Amino acid sequence: MRQVEAGNVELFPRHEMLDLIMEDGRARGVVVRNLINGEVKHYTADAVVLASGGYGNVYFLSTNAMGSNVTASWRAHRHGALFANPCYTQIHPTCIPVSGDHQSKLTLMSESLRNDGRVWVPKKAKDERRPADIPEDERDYYLERIYPSFGNLVPRDIASRAAKNVCDEGRGVGPGGLGVYLDFSDAIGRLGRDKVEAKYGNLFEMYERITGENPYDTPMRIYPAVHYTMGGLWVDYDLESTVPGLFVIGEANFSDHGANRLGASALMQGLADGYFVLPATINDYIARNALPPVADTAIAEAEERVNGRIEKLLSIDGDRSVDSFHRELGHIMWEYCGMERTEEGLRKALELIPALREEFWKRVKVTGKGEELNQQLEKAGRVADFFELGELMVIDALHRSESCGGHFRAESQDEEGEAKRDDDAFGYVAAWGWSGEGAKPVLHKEALNFEYVKPTQRSYK
């Protein structure tokens, strides 16, 4: 942004990338749509950098804004950029639960709240009493019970899966039973309200503004939600994808936040990308590749692809809204390719997603025109890509018949019901190649070598 202020970089806000301009196998620019007036235009370059974030909205509801999508990465994937570890997702246990069909996103609460908050649900299913009316001996502090060594501070994937399990048992609280309590009454009694307010006051205020409930007086309600995605376009150590001239940074690539098979924050890697790696490697690429101006034919082909897709979406004129398809896809992904996965469920998803995608291209209704502000058209293009990505995520999850990091395969657990790793069989990056419409993706394996710190089976009990 300093360079923007200095006049060296020009921003084009409210534009969405819809395709790559490809010439001789290289990325040479992008085709974008102006989201205000619908104008489709192109920008050519010697190299392209994607910094378009993750794809958590394939689940419909996530902590991401609805504008966060996979279109830029997926268009690149279809031009030959390998997509690595797509099924790796980071699911956060401390989000404000969904409260109705009106929501387009979920709000993340800091996990620091688990330092002092105690997580519990009623022992009895469908207990609709107020939390203050449920005595201690009728409460299940399930994390403390199952994981006595770590209690409420177990890793986020364990806390998330445990919360979904008790809600699936019918013991969830709040609207739809999709929530668990995060209770600060003990902390207030032990530390005093002033000290709790000094530590968490801004979070408590945010929670009260959203829910209308005062967490000093009544326990917060939380539920897991998709946060980061750890898969993304494969890159080498120069941050270049398998498409020459296409560089990918931050959450849009798989790199540190996916390749480690644990789920570290993409922010740390994204900062390193932006400040240290890319300024050297992209300059080196440009210096080594003296490229001529982009041919008009390459530009025309890319614009034709974009305009053709827009026209196709507008021409269907069906009877179902874009959101109805997105919501149904999100439900499939959450239930079968979420925190806990089974071979049976994943195979079912591989039947449901293609059938829903086929219905989408026959029945979706996109109102308005392309040459205007048209948010339904924007959504339709993104959801169409989510169908293809969702299927690849399920294929990747089915292929990984182990439990590791942020995903749990029910068939791969130890005698205590905890995640059972298989590093000998799955210690590699799974990078998938696009093979064309209707063709199966091709798997490429990049071995992970651990010289100093070896992966180990974990236990938090």
Image (spheres, helix red, strand yellow):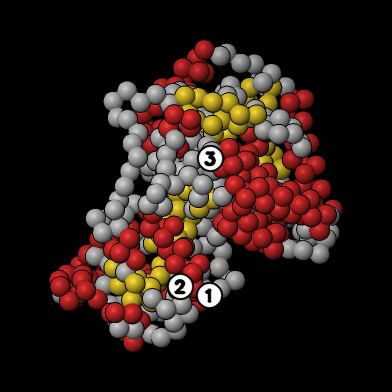
Q: Which residue is drawn at 30% across and 64% down?
A: 145
* Residue type at numbered disc 1: Gly
The alpha-carbon separation of the residues under discs 2 and 1 comes to 8 Å
Residue that badge 2 annotates: 172
174 in relation to 52, above or below: below
Q: What residue is shown with label 3?
A: 401
Tag shown at residue 397? none
Residue pointed to by mark 1: 176
Q: Nearer the viewer, residue 296 or 306?
A: 306
Q: Earlier in the sequence, mark 3 or mark 2?
A: 2
User: From the image, which quarter does the N terminus lie in?
Assistant: top left
Q: Residue 218 is drawn in which quadrant?
A: bottom left
Q: Identify whether 405 is placed above or below 441.
A: below
Label 3 neighbourhood size at 10 Å, few (<14), some (14-19), many (20+)?
Answer: many
Gap between marks 1 and 3 measured at Cα: 32 Å
Q: Can you tell which quarter of the image residue 3 is in? A: top left
